[in-house]
Image (tube, helix red, strand yellow):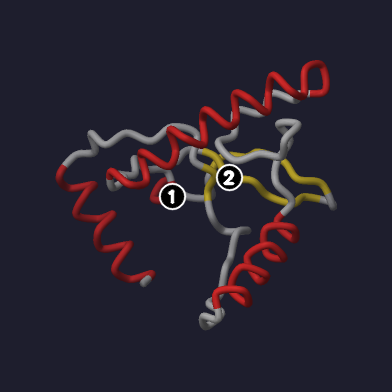
């Protein structure tokens, strides 16, 4: 992850991560890689459907027109899914989550250890 999405003066904008520790390679489990590949196919279909209305943002997750997802809409959708599933609501914080631009499963062992540690701490 090398970029983040922030709201500045009421507008969403891309920016570098806040600290060097925030910029990292993230090793993804195979189910996540498969889901991202399916998502990429849907993203390509959305791009074709949008035509001239498409905004190329370089983001992995966007609206159907290629623009950044509005954090409030993500929270609203997440809340509806939690309610439908009948599970406990957990805190879902997107404002401090860097936006992944490129992920590689070839992270170094020291990075993988740190990522595993970070994952365990956030669980």
- The circle drawn on residue 4 is 2
Q: Secondary structure at mark 2?
A: strand
Position of residue 76 measured from the top left corner of the image (x, y, whole percent) = 72, 65
Q: Which class describes the residues within 10 Å of circle 1: few (<14), some (14-19), or many (20+)?
A: some
- The circle drawn on residue 93 is none
Position of residue 52 measured from the top left corner of the image (x, y, whole percent) = 82, 16
Taking the spot 48% from the left edge, 38% from the top edge, the residue there is 2
Q: Is residue 93 above or below residue 47?
A: below
Q: Secondary structure at mark 1?
A: helix
Taking the spot 22% from the left edge, 49% from the top edge, the residue there is 112
Q: Is residue 86 above or below residue 120?
A: below
Q: Which class describes the residues within 10 Å of circle 2: few (<14), some (14-19), or many (20+)?
A: many
Q: Is residue 17 above or below residue 58?
A: below
Image quarter (top left, top right, bottom left or bottom right) of the N terminus: top left
Position of residue 48 measured from the top left corner of the image (x, y, whole percent) = 69, 19
Kindly identify which residue carries mark 1.
22
Taking the spot 28% from the left edge, 47% from the top edge, the residue there is 29
Pointer 2 and pointer 1: residues touching (CB < 8 Å)? Answer: yes
């Amino acid at each position: 992850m090398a970029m983040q999405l922030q709201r500045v003066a009421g507008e969403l904008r891309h920016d570098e991560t806040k600290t060097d520790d925030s910029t990292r390679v993230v090793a993804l489990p195979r189910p996540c890689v498969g889901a991202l590949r399916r998502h990429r196919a849907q993203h390509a279909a959305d791009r074709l459907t949008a035509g001239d209305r498409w905004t190329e943002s370089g983001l992995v997750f966007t609206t159907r027109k290629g623009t950044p997802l509005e954090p409030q809409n993500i929270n609203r959708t997440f809340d509806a899914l939690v309610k439908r599933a009948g599970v406990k609501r957990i805190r879902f914080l997107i404002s401090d989550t860097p936006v992944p631009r490129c992920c590689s499963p070839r992270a170094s062992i020291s990075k993988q250890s740190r990522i595993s540690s970070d994952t365990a701490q956030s669980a």
